[in-house]
Each structure stands twice: as C-alpha cells, then as structure tokens.
Amino acid sequence: MKHNELTKERNIRVAHLSTVHHPTDPRIYHKQCLSLHKAGFDVYLIAQEDGHESNKPIQHIPLKKTSGRLKRMIFGTFQLYRQAKKLKADIYHFHDPELMIVGWLLKKRTNIVIYDIHEDYVTSILQKKYMNSFLRKMAAKLYTFFEKIFTRKLELTLAEKYYYDIYQRGTLVLNYPIINERLMDERSMDLPLENKLLYTGNVTEDRGALIHANLPNIIKDISVYFIGKCPRALADQMNEISAEVEGGITIEGVDQFIEKEYIDKMYMQRRWLAGIALFPPTDHYMKKELTKFFEYMNAGLPIICSNFPVWDAFINKYNCGITVDPYDEKAIKEAIMYLINNPDQAKQMGENGRRAIKDELNWSVEETKLIQLYNDLLQNV
C-alpha cells in the first residue's frame, strides 16, 4: 500500500519532538515536517515557543521556555513528555539526545519511535573544553551506555553518511537542501561581483568564527558578512580582531536565531565573492559534509573551505570551490585573490555547484526515503 493510500485509510498522527531546536529548524520543520504534511500525514511539532502566532500548516504545540541547559533538560523534557503522551501518535520522531528517555517511555507495541541523529554526539562530548580529559571520556562512555539501552527498540534516522559506521544500523536521511528555485535563478549571477564573503548558520569558535573575523586583516579590500546566531561575547571578540579594518565584518544574529527565509533573502541580495567555511580541524566536523556547502551551492556561490580530506574530495568532485589550510594565511589570501582576479572561473564554480544540487544533492531524494521509511514501518505495526 502506498503512503497516500495508507494515510487515507487511517488518520496517521506523527509527532516531531525537540526541546533544543528552534521550531522552524530547517531539517525538522522545512524538510521533514512539511514533506510529511504534503504526503498526507497529520503532523504535530512539539518544540519551544517561537514568540509569535503563526498560520503555518504544521500544528505546533509550544513548550514554555526555561532558562539554562539543566532546567531545559529536566523541566522542558518532562513538559514535552506530557504533551507527547497526550497526542497518542502513531509515530514519534525525536531530534535531541536528551529525549532518549522520552522516546523509550513513549515506545509501545502499537506505535513507532524514531531517533533522528543530527550529530556525532560522542565526538562532540570528547571535545567539550569545559571538562577535563577524564570527565570527557567518562561522559562519552556513559552517553554510549545509555544510548544503547534507551534506543535498542527504537528506529534510527541518520543525517550524515559516516554515522552509519558508528551505529551499524538506521536509515540515511541526509541533510541535503530543498531546491530553492529563486536562488537557482541565473539572473542573480548577472549582478556585479563584490569583494564580500558570506558565512551563514550558527557562528561559533569551532565553526571558524575567529579565523573568518581575521580575513579582512589578510586582505584589506574584502569584508565578511555573518548571517546566523552568534553569542554576544564571541561577537565582541570577533569585532576586536577585525577592529583595524573599518567595516571589515558585519554580524547579523547576535544572540538571536535567524530564520531560513531571511538567510535566503541575503543570498540573493548581492553577488557574493564566495561562501566560506574555514573551520579549525576537529573530529566533529572533519568527517561531515556541511549543510552550508549545499546552501552555498544552491545559491551559486563558490566555496572557500578547510582542506580536510572529506571536504577536499567533495569540493574536487563537484569543482565548486577552493580548499586551503585554515591556518595558512598566505594560502587563504591566494584563494581569495584567485576568485577576485578570475571572475569567470568563480562564476563557473558557482554554476557547477548549482548543477550538482539540481541533479543530485537535493532534499527531494531524501524526502522519498523518509516517506518510504514511514510507510514500511507502519506496515509492520
């Protein structure tokens, strides 16, 4: 039975759950929830309040905000569990590791519970700077132990290819982008090329914030725009680094979440020189194909990123940018100057990226996999 036939025969209720992510998170809301809604499922989203009423098609059950991580993990999780239990959903799909116990409690013989793994959490724990080496190792072992217990009877969906090497099971539902036809419009490539570099997404030190803030010091004629949530203390540090170059950096998103729609608007505002991802080497990111790569490619931007083996192979495969040592200022300067001095080649890199997104690296393929997974699981309940 096809999924649309199945949803017509039964009013299949689906609940996506998160205490951590913003209610319009791109993967959760724009990709998974909207795709499932379009396929005929009765979709609910239990997530934090977003501060305003909405007429969006997904039924959002807001959680009261809590201050601090510990309160969120205790009170937010309990609040979410109560709301989720009331729904009596056919499928629960949760997105945060702190909700594993909720998933375990919700699992019944007559329903399906899916754990959507967004990150390599063990590697992330091992890189926490606020814990010493012994505590990090103990925390990673405890996390692995509890994860095996609480997810043993649950289904897994994996956002990255290499996660399968860790879990040895689950369904790959990769975080490829929804094709944005407005960004695909070739006319945006006819705007005059500006010496402006763009970074989108959460701004953190392990995502290269300090390296990126230093770029105007390497080449005085360029400026860097950051569009994404950035802690104020980090923003102050970045502004201090670039202080000698007036207008060297612009940060939009200090202590606030930036909606996907606004980021898309910024992609179209001008013809950017490149999208950047000069991350310092960490185990957490070196194995990943960054979501921002796909977004830059969708927008027709050449990419300048770190020369990690996985990233280097990706950029070379699609011929969509330049990889460099993130600590080699000379190499970074040469990469930026190459794009400035060779606008036709820069444009071709952007077009190569767009073509790859259109032909291969897009959400429509993953959407089919997600809906097929739901359909297959429902057949066995």
Image (tube, rainbow, N blue to C red):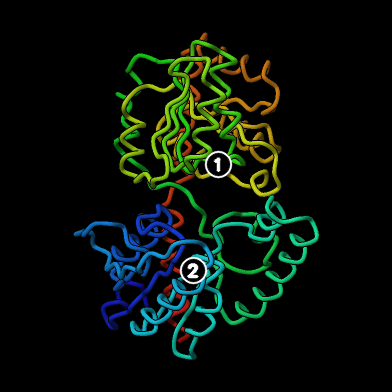
Q: Which amino acid, mark 2?
A: Lys
> In terms of secondary structure, where does tag 1 sit?
loop
- Give the residue drawn at x 59%, y 57%: 119
Closer to the camera, 304 or 375?
304
Q: 59 left or right of 2?
A: left
- Give the residue drawn at x 76%, y 55%: 132
Q: Tell me the number on the disc at residue 377.
A: none
Is disc 1 surrounded by few (<14), some (14 to 19) or many (20+) residues within 10 Å? some
Is disc 2 surrounded by few (<14), some (14 to 19) or many (20+) residues within 10 Å? few
Q: Are marks 1 and 2 in contact (CB under 8 Å)?
A: no
Image height of 93 relative to 206, above or below: below
Location of residue 91 (image quadrant) = bottom left
Image height of 377 relative to 49, above or below: below
CA gap, disc 1 and disc 2: 23 Å
> In terms of secondary structure, where does tag 2 sit?
helix
Q: Earlier in the sequence, mark 1 or mark 2?
A: 2
Q: Position of residue 45 (x, y in %)?
A: 34, 68
Closer to the camera, 216 or 377?
216
Judging by the rendered image, the residue that carries numbered circle 2 is 71
**Quick one: quadrant of the N terminus?**
bottom left
Q: Position of residue 370 (x, y in %)?
A: 45, 64
Q: Position of residue 283 (x, y in %)?
A: 71, 47
Q: 337 left or right of 87?
A: right
- Give the residue drawn at x 67%, y 43%: 286
Judging by the rendered image, the residue that carries numbered circle 1 is 204
Q: Residue furthest top?
A: 341
Location of residue 80 (image quadrant) = bottom left
Q: Residue furthest bottom?
A: 109
**Quick one: quadrant of the C terminus?**
bottom left
